[in-house]
Amino acid sequence: MATRLNGLQSAAMRYCKIRVTTASVSSVMCAVVLIVLSFFVRRWMGDTGTYTPTQGTVRGGSVAAEQHKGAVTYTVNYDVEYTVSNKKYYTTVSGPGGFGTRAYAQSALDSAINTRVVTIYVDPSDPAKNTTIRNREDYLMMGMLVVGGLALTYGIISYVLRDNPIMCGMQVASNVHSIFRN
């Protein structure tokens, strides 16, 4: 009986070792992909860190209806005029949303025309390129690096501890839900 139990325990440990090794290798591969891709985010999204701020004035706009959880809400989109090197440029900026009625949203738009000043970040080499949020690619890059770093850390630690019975216990515990499902 003891021999059979030892055989089952060693088979369970081999199974767990395979699962932990597979999980750790998969985790490291995903981490490497995330970390490598994070360095290309600026190329794909455009580096807005060098954009310079300028002030724009709301000159017009529109009100758009949106369906959200079965209710209709209204969003204001502002047409903004800004000047760089004595040349005028125009862009559309999404304004506040969630207005309950079109009239309320229109009132917000009407009160902003020719009075509301908006900060626009423009590309110094091409002022027609603009954004209202500067360095957004940095947040994505940092998020990818953090998640990649966590996945890499998990992969390395789980690989080093793959022979540890506690890691095996964690794998078994993660499969308990499938035992009770059947």
Image: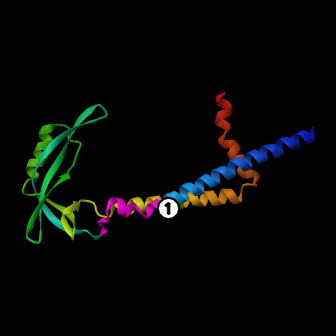
Q: What's the residue at 13%, 62% (across, down)?
A: 56
Question: Relative to 82, is 37 on the left or the right?
Answer: right
- Residue 39 percent across, percent down from the top left: 43, 64
Element carrying mark 1: helix
Q: What's the residue at 59%, 57% (across, down)?
A: 28
- Residue 156 percent across, percent down from the top left: 64, 60
Where, by quadrant of the figure, is residue 7 drawn?
A: top right
The residue under label 1 is which amino acid type?
Answer: Ile
Q: Which residue is mark 1?
A: 35
Q: Is residue 47 magenta?
A: yes
Neighbours of disc 1 within 10 Å: few (<14), some (14-19), many (20+)? many
- Residue 85 percent across, percent down from the top left: 11, 72
Question: Relative to 35, is 56 on the left or the right?
Answer: left
Quadrant that contains the C terminus: top right
Q: Nearer the viewer, residue 134 or 26?
A: 26
**Range shown magenta:** 34-49
- Residue 35 percent across, percent down from the top left: 49, 61
Residue 81 shows up from this direction:
yes
